[in-house]
Image (spheres, grey):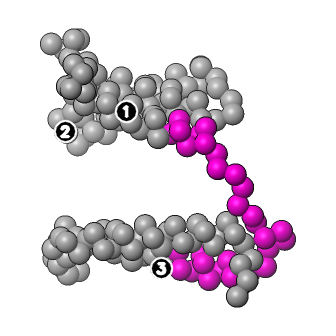
Amino acid sequence: MKIKSQQDFFSGLMFMAVGIAFAWGATTYTIGEGARMGPGYFPLVLGVLLAAMGAFIVFESLVVETENGDPIGKWAWKPLGFIIGANLLFGILLGGLPSIGLPAMGMIVAIYGLTFVSSLAGDEFNIREVVVLATLLAIGSYLAFIVLLKLQFQVWPTFITG
């Protein structure tokens, strides 16, 4: 069969690979059953559904005609680098790096760092919009995780809270 949409074909393969990996990884936990779900139940079901969705997308890419074959473009290295870097920065700021003596900066600083670095991945950068977004994300995260769920995250840097 001829691939009629390269984008759909390869995205379907990616969904299938991630779904199979999740389902396979879930088998190391207790699965349980529908009435008494174990810790592996949700990742197993999610993995199977993701793999099935990927298989459907691959099938569709082989059957449905597209105008130009939806070729895959070049890798977008700049956005990829900034998004991965932003996530690494978030983890470092949230937990610190004791090996080099960097203390944990807390959730608020980590969210601001994540938002600023990830916003550099786009074509446009508006500092005012980024500050508003980071502030809304910080407030929303504080309300969701600290106030409502009562999770024990460090909110502020250690040099502020002591």
Nearer the observer, 78 or 141 = 78
Count of numbered circles on the image:
3
Which comes before the other along the chain, label 2 or label 1? 1
Left/right placement of residue 19 relative to residue 7 reads left
Q: Mark 1 sits on what residue?
A: 90
Q: Is residue 37 visible?
A: no
Q: Amino acid at mark 1?
A: Phe
Rendered image quadrant of residue 32: bottom left
| Spatial CA span between label 2 and label 3 | 36 Å
Measured from the top left, where is residue 123 in percent x and y?
Answer: 69, 33
Q: Secondary structure at mark 3?
A: helix
Q: Amino acid at mark 2?
A: Lys
The label number, if any, that marks residue 150 in the structure image: 2
Q: Mark 3 sits on what residue?
A: 52
Residue 35 falls inside the magenta stretch = no
Q: Secondary structure at mark 2?
A: loop
Local packing at callout 1 (Cα closer than 10 Å; few below 14, some 14-19, many 20+) is many
Measured from the top left, where is residue 153 in percent x and y?
Answer: 21, 33
Q: Which residue is painted at 23% across and 43% down in the image?
A: 149
Q: Are marks 2 and 3 in contact (CB under 8 Å)?
A: no
Q: Which region shows up in magenta?
A: 54-83
